[in-house]
Amino acid sequence: MKFIISGDNWPINQKIKDLTDKHIGQKIDKYLKSFDQGLKTARLKITKGPRWGFGASLKIRLPKREIFAKSQAKNLLKALTIIRNQAIRQIKEYKEKIKART
């Protein structure tokens, strides 16, 4: 899966890239093995607010579907966990709809 990470008001270093790949990329990729590698694209945007902590949004493009998850939390790991769980739930629903059609 092509995984693009960007930061808003916050620089993204290698440590953050490794954390997001381990915590989101590898976990979500387990559920997307049935899709062609060239058709999967994920875009993660991390923001840091002056008062409320971290925000994260994840957009995954799949054939005929776009999955979107968004969260805010006081620490980055919690925000990433929330969007990972939201995305996995949506992917499971999408795969069930595909199976029901066939």
Image (cartoon, rainbow, N blue to C red):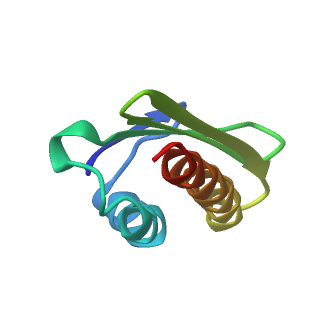
In this rendered view, identify the residue nearer to me: 79 or 62. Answer: 62
Q: Is residue 73 above or below residue 38?
A: below
Q: Looking at the image, is 90 positioned above or below residue 23?
A: above
Image quadrant assignment for residue 63: top left
Q: Residue furthest right?
A: 51
Most extreme residue toward the front is: 102
Q: Is residue 79 left or right of residue 16?
A: right
Residue 1 drawn at (x, y percent): 26, 51
| Residue 19 % position (x, y) | 42, 68
Residue beneath the point at 77% across and 46% down: 72
Which residue is pictured at 30% across the width and 59% down the height? 34
Residue situated in front as seen by the camera: 20 or 85: 85
How many marks can you see?
0
Q: Is residue 21 left or right of residue 58?
A: left
**Left or right position of 89 against 63:** right
94, above or below 30, in the image: above
Vertical order, 64 against 20 (above or below)? above
- Rendered image quadrant of residue 71: top right
Residue at image coords 34%, 58%: 17
Residue 74 screen position, x and y as percent: 79, 57
Query: Residue farthest to the left?
Result: 38
- Which residue sits at x=20%, y=48%? 36
User: Can you give x and y, in whole percent of width and height, for residue 18 in the image?
Assistant: 33, 67
